[in-house]
Amino acid sequence: MKWTLGQLAKIQNFPYRFKETFLFKEHIHTIDDLIDIGECEVEGELYRIDYDTYRLELTIKVELVIACALTLNPVKYPMNIKVSEIYSTVDDKEYNLIDKNTIDLSEIVWTSIIIEKPIKVVSENARQILKERGINLDEDVSKYYDKSFHKTKD
């Protein structure tokens, strides 16, 4: 969903409510630990602040499948994100600039998902899985530490 400035000017009743579903599967190859992404449901309201400035209030619901940081097994991670952004044709540091006379909702939603995606997730049973693989994270790792690479100043 995109709105051009011409389309925005024609909207008479604010807030303008909308509901949209996005599929971002083609975007996930750019994120290393993102295995899959479900349908992304977006509900929102568009407010006119003035003729050149608009505020978007969004609720984004999506389920990500992210690789566990310890086992690399898939972990389902549901997201429910609230976003409030102001867009304007006025080049002001407080606003997002309306690029190419268009507000592109899919770009806003994808960016919000990536910003809110956790850096890492760990499955609830990760330690048990690792133990079954013969890996004990509670082990003293100092025996694997090569002290010859660690030099201190005299």
Image (tube, helix red, strand yellow):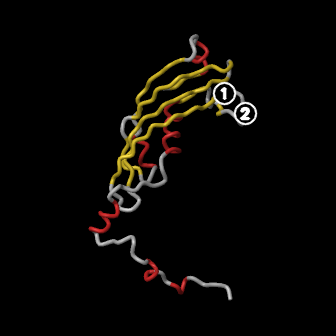
Q: Amino acid at mark 2?
A: Asp
Q: Residue at the far left: name it.
A: 132
Left or right of 121 in this view: 56? right
Which quadrant of the figure contains the C terminus?
Answer: bottom right
Are circles 2 and 1 on residues that touch, CB within 8 Å? yes
Q: From this view, report whether residue 94 is shown above or below residue 31.
A: above
Residue at (59% x, 18% y) in the render: 8
Residue 46: which numbered mark, if any?
A: none
Left or right of 50 in this view: 126? left
Q: From this view, report whether residue 49 is shown above or below residue 151.
A: above
Tell which of 40 and 28 is nearer to you.
40
Q: From this view, report whether residue 128 is shown above or below residue 77.
A: below
Residue 117 on image: x %, y %: 48, 46
Which secondary structure, mark 2? loop
Residue at (49% x, 83% y) in the render: 146
Residue 129 on image: x %, y %: 30, 63
Q: Amino acid at mark 1?
A: Ser
Residue 17 on image: x %, y %: 50, 19
Left or right of 93 in this view: 137? left
Which secondary structure, mark 1? strand
Left or right of 39 in this view: 149? right
Mark 1, Cα crowd under 10 Å, few <14 / some 14-19 / many 20+, is many
Tell which of 127 and 105 is nearer to you.
127
Residue 33 on image: x %, y %: 42, 53
Q: CA distance from mark 2 to mark 1?
A: 8 Å
Residue 88: which numbered mark, if any?
A: 1
Q: Would you name the residue on which mark 2 appears?
A: 92
Mark 2, Cα crowd under 10 Å, few <14 / some 14-19 / many 20+, is few
Tell which of 125 and 70 is nearer to you.
125
